[in-house]
Amino acid sequence: MSDSRSLISRRRLLQGAGAMWLLSVSQVGFAASSLVVAVRVWPASSYTRVTLESNKQLKYKQFALSNPDRVVVDIEGVNLNSVLKGIGGQIRGDDPFIKSARVGQFDPQTVRMVFELKQNVTPHLFALAPVAEFKERLVMDLYPANMNSEQDPLLALLEDYNNGKLDKDTPPSPEQGPQPGKAGRDRPIVIMLDPGHGGEDPGAIGPNKTREKDIVLKIARRLKALIDKEANMKAYMTRNEDVFIPLKVRVAKAQKQRADLFVSIHADAFTSGAARGSSVFALSTKGATSTAAKFLAQTQNAADLIGGVSKSGDRYLDHTMFDMVQSLTINDSLKFGKEVLARLGKVNKLHKNSVDQAGFAVLKAPDIPSILVETAFLSNVEEERKLRTATFQQEVAESILAGIKAYFADSSRLARRG
């Protein structure tokens, strides 16, 4: 098999019974036995992801069986080992899609995995090339076959994403911008909270194994609870569980909910454990304002590669989308970020006293002032300890809310966002 065919097959989506894609680099790769080094199962309300990590790309086929409903995945050139045998123990009782899983050596060259289902699903299988600490990965996402897009906008957006509809480089429709009326006066201020990372993508990991995805979800939940107590505010979250959501789906959800503000919440990491402090970032379409901001944007924009997406291409990274981002929105983002940064400085040391800028993919909604808050450095032992405490998490949430209130206290800004 040629190298070009191998590259093309990496991102192809597998659907339907009996389909099979050959995902090996060469015939030599087929001859040598592949070793599965990890199996991970990520159940969530929107979809369940099963990931097999191996030292080589895997050759597989997938099909469906009924009575009871099952998804079967045959993997060739693999021997059953303790890692594969443990997959049944990873199925949780609250998994909405998988009832049970079993695995066996179907023949001398094939391991068969059988997933008994709780509901009818649409499987999406694809391969991921090595990135960061991950080796070759085979991913199976199980989505509900009958998505209720009206009740769950995230499911609808994920369906559009998997069908390639979010890749179309089209201008945002009027329905994607902020709602009519003056935010906070005629209608509630709508705020989209974006806990970074999730699922397969842990984000930064502290010296004591604290995972960024867990900490920022806790902070976002605290902030949502505070916002929802305000009479003139309403908060939504891009994710409210341990699930991976592609970057552009996060942005699209903010547009779908017609958000007035977008706040992405993170916990930074650096090669030196001495780095510390809170930071706030806004979008730049003209290059990063510092080397640190450029580095951070590169690491955050790699979330899709780490978390695992089945398609390439992102209109929010395309230069034509950059051109559509109006200077007014970026200016509002800087003003919003300045208010939040000032409040964060009261509960933690600031890494920098001004709002930094870079090309963050998650901040590129054209008509929504958007900031990325780095709450503290997980790579710093002392700040990792603080991030783990309910007290500091609450202080960060209260600081962001205070910044939101200060930003909207300007009556002229209320009019502009109406």
Image: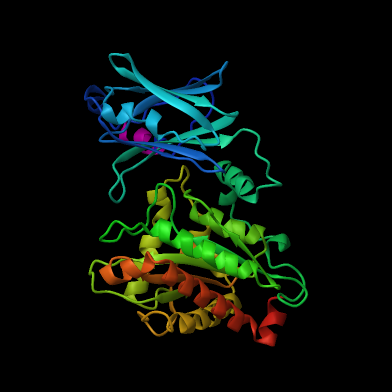
Q: Measured along the vertical axis of the image, is residue 50 above or below residue 223?
A: above
207 and 38: which one is in front? Answer: 207
| For residue 142, side relative to residue 130 (left or right) | right
Q: Residue at x 29, y 17 (%)?
A: 109
164 and 44: which one is in front? Answer: 44
Which quadrant does the C terminus fall into? bottom right
**Magenta part of the chain:** 1-8
Residue 286 appears in view: no
Magenta span contains residue 227: no
Q: Position of residue 201 (x, y in %)?
A: 39, 51
| For residue 211, side relative to residue 258 (left or right) | left
Q: Residue at x 24, y 28 (%)?
A: 29
- Could you say which quadrant of the image residue 232 lies in? bottom right
- Could you say which quadrant of the image residue 197 lies in? bottom left
Residue 141 appears in view: yes
Q: Position of residue 165 (x, y in %)?
A: 60, 47
| For residue 369, side relative to residue 257 (left or right) | left
Q: Position of residue 388 (x, y in %)?
A: 37, 64
296 and 243: which one is in front? Answer: 243
